[in-house]
Image (spheres, grey):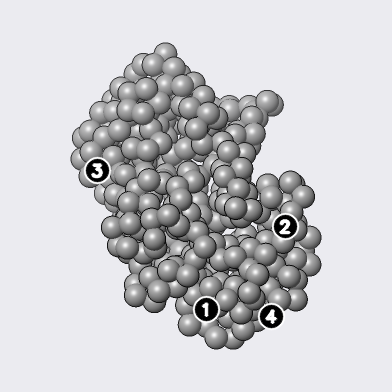
Amino acid sequence: MRILQISSAASFGGGERYVADLTNSLHQRGHDLYVAVRPRSPLIDQLQIDPANIKTLPLRNALDVQSANELARFVRRHEIEVVHAHMARDYSLAAYAARRNRNTKFIVTRHVLFPLNRLHRRTLARAHRVIAVSNAVARELRHARIAHDDRITVVHNGIDVARFVLEDFDRAEFLRALGLPADCLLVGSIGELRTLKRHDDFIRAAATIALRFPQAHFVLAGIDTSPTSEVRRQLDQLVSELQLADRFHFLGWLDEAEQLLRAMDVFVSASETESFGLAIAEAMAAGTAVVATETEGAREVVDDQKTGLLVPIGVVPRIAEAVASLLAQEEQRKEIGLRAKKAVAEKFSLPRMVDKIEAIYTS
């Protein structure tokens, strides 16, 4: 099958990991994969397909006529059978390209819970299938009457658990390379530096935890993609105010995310909204105990008290208390991590996700 994935993403996050893993997996299964991205897209380096099959376009916005026409020509020239879009601003461009080619199916994955505007509603009404990455996203789509119920399908994000099998991983050496004590207790988070991720709550919780555990260090991996980097400046200031400068470390973009998750004793997600919580599931796949706020996505991934601990959104003392309880009880921490790893392999594996999406393509 000839399949075109479209993503105008300018940074690499959970949605982009989804596109890369899906594209590479389908390519390995023998399908002909093509990808349309912006120039200098971070996705390009993650793709394992023929570079000749990667099309760069401006993909400026939902009304980018030039990109829409070029996409339509690209679909016709390569006889694309499925056009699959992943970002709201790409939906209308993908729909147009599919509509101009009668035998092409138009598929959308909705990765987030944010509301769509009227243009997107009209566009998605034409989709052959709208894939929701969680039940929470599906509920939002149905509540907003985005598409007919029979066209909305839940396919949970898939985790490539093989990425977290690091047989020769030396935790002490990895921590030393980061400038951290080799024997420290490590509490961390991974995520774009955005206000809705509530990394400030994580930092405030870290200040409380640091008083009880002198050997604990804290890391945050992620970048601020805003034009002014205001969020990073605010977080830096908070770390300074709480006198955590020698204990809290900003790692920026990190290629070795799998190694960092393996090195952590506890992973923290303090977000106020998660449609699924891919970073949470990846931490679980690494066998790391998770403390997450009770977002709709986290509740679908984490079985409270069994595969992780769930706490109320925005309640810093509860976040600190949950993390401290895991740091104080190594046996419980490891047991939760093992159960979490097993749960991800059973419920959220990448092959399972690809199987379901492949079936949608061919149905």
Q: Secondary structure at mark 1?
A: loop
Q: What amino acid type should be assigned to the residue bearing mark 1?
A: Arg
Splitting the image into 4 quarters, where does residue 296 fall?
top left
For residue 349, side relative to residue 78 (left or right)? left
Camera-nearest label, 3 or 1: 1
Viewer-nearest residue: 336 or 115: 115
Q: Is residue 32 above or below residue 210?
A: below
Rate crowding at label 1 as few (under 14), some (14 to 19) or many (20 or more) other CA atoms within 10 Å.
Answer: some
Q: CA distance from mark 3 to mark 4?
A: 47 Å
In the depicted view, which residue is nearer to us: 156 or 330?
A: 156
On residue 73, which mark appears?
4
**Residue that badge 2 annotates:** 1
Which amino acid, by three-letter code, is at mark 4? Arg
Marked residue nearer the N-terminal end (2 or 1): 2
Q: Which residue carries the number 3 mark?
A: 313
Amino acid carrying label 3: it is: Ile
Please, what secondary structure does the residue beneath circle 4 have? helix
Q: Earlier in the sequence, mark 3 or mark 4?
A: 4
Say whether residue 289 is visible: yes
Asked if the residue at tag 4 contacts the one at tag 3, i.e. Cβ–Cβ closer than 8 Å, the answer is no
Q: Residues within 10 Å of mark 4 (few under 14, many from 20)?
A: some
Q: Position of residue 7 (x, y in %)?
A: 56, 65
Mark with earlier residue (1, 4): 1
Which residue was labeled with disc 1?
A: 60
The amino acid marked with disc number 2 is: Met
